[in-house]
Amino acid sequence: MNQTQSIQLRTDNQTLDLPVILGTEDDRGIDISKLRAQTGYVTLDDGFANTGACKSAITYIDGEKGILRYRGYPIEQLAERGTFIETALLLIYGELPTADHLERFRELLTAKELLHEGLYKLFDGFPPNAHPMAVLSAMINATSCYYPEITQMEDESTFEIAAARLISKVRTMAAASHKKSLGQPLMYPDPGLRYCQNFLHMMFSLPNKPYEPDPDIVNAINRILILHADHEQNCSTSTVRMVASSGANLFASCAAGVCALWGRLHGGANMAVIEMLEHIHKNKIDLKQYIEQVKDKSSGIRLMGFGHRVYKNFDPRARILKDSADKVLTKLNINDPLLDLARRLEEVALEDSYFKDRNLYPNVDFYSGIIMRTIGIPVNMFTVMFAIGRMPGWIANWKEVHDDTTGRISRPRQVYVGPTKRDYVPVEQRAAK
């Protein structure tokens, strides 16, 4: 990354030279950090669609070409050949782990997978119908109360213990919230199982009936987690970075990320796919008729799980998950009208020139929703799965902020559009509206 040129900005009677920052993939950004001090102006960019809030070395996306890379590694290679824990360490530390580092971190995950018994008692304070994202955020914050040393990370070893504790415990919390909602006994993690198998065990085992997942199901979960591990400066990651900029600890920052991810416009996208399929099935809507309604912009009907705000051609993660979805659906051979409907919808949409001409292909949310429903993960847990996968990316971004000794607390500006100065009016003199 370097500065090679500048752009001139004329404001009133002043000309200002703004430095141009070039990223390693030829990303270009205009440095406006001194704009207000020198001109009195600020920029206005609703939704920050054109604003670079930071410099980051973690994830690279080219939406036009359908490229996603973690620390330079193509997502296709990581999903095909790597594991979620390898990917987590890559994101956090910048390099693929050595065999020794990977084994040491796996041992840490096993050592930190149990929740403090006091935390298990907290689950009794939530109603059975509590949303698991609310439970997850609360439990992450509560966990930090039991480990006060996480607020003072003096070196890399104390940070790694905190990161392992969070990555390991988040699946234990998630599975426990699911069991609580069903009224089933909470299942303790099995130290003999790897990360994804252990999560499925805690989700689906019963004391009298252990769950033994098929390797293709384990591989599908591994891929879902890898593909969601980071995605540049999205809403939840930006939230984590903003909270981290205040000096907040790792757990508090990631709990804030969970809350941001909970929003229906962010982490709820794969839930929306299943809700759309349920609507079509319940109302017995003809698929071709539904597609025609989608194409009519005045109808207000959207085809959920197709297209992406960032990827203008195709979502590279969707291509990877389609293969896993086909394997899981074929192997489990579940008679589910919604899954049949999803496959028919995919065929109808991909054969229609309207969608092909606009590059509206199935995205990662479409296939992840199908896979999770096939496995038996309930819809209200979809966003929790997203949070488990995104945890390494949040941790990596927290670390990037934490390690930047020149960083400042995030404090966006605004353009005020409210009333100008006015005087206080006593209550008896205020006119009724």
Image (spheres, rainbow, N blue to C red):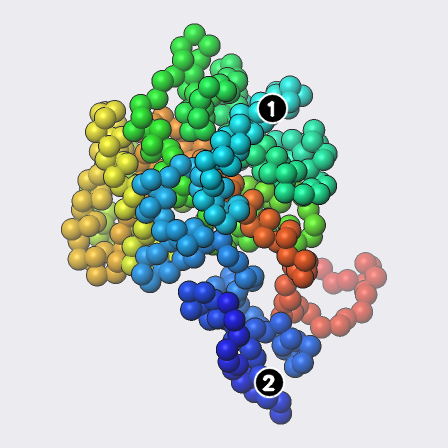
Looking at the picture, how far across and down is residue 221, in whole percent? 37, 33
Q: CA distance from mark 2 to mark 1?
A: 56 Å
Q: Residue at x 54, y 85 (%)?
A: 8
Question: In the image, what residue type sits under mark 1?
Answer: Leu
In the rendered image, which residue does mark 2 sit on? 16
Looking at the image, residue 343 lies above or below residue 169: below
Q: Quadrant of the C terminus?
A: bottom right
Q: Secondary structure at mark 2?
A: strand
Residue furthest top in the image: 208
Q: Position of residue 227 (x, y in %)?
A: 39, 44
- Residue, far bottom: 13
Q: Is residue 251 visible?
A: no
Q: 51 above or below 260?
A: below
Given residues 215 and 281, the one toward you in this image is 215
Q: Are marks 2 and 1 in contact (CB under 8 Å)?
A: no
Residue topped by disc 1: 115
Q: Secondary structure at mark 1?
A: loop
Q: Viewer-proximal residue, 84 or 383?
A: 84
Q: Nearer the viewer, residue 76 or 183?
A: 76
The answer to whether residue 267 is left or right of residue 137 is: left
Q: Residues within 10 Å of mark 1 (few under 14, many from 20)?
A: some
Name the residue at 42% across, 69% down. 26
Q: Is residue 107 visible?
A: yes
Q: Residue at x 49, y 31 (%)?
A: 103
* Picture residue at 25% right of the left edge, 60% below the top: 358
Query: Which numbered disc flags the more N-terminal residue, 2 or 1?
Result: 2
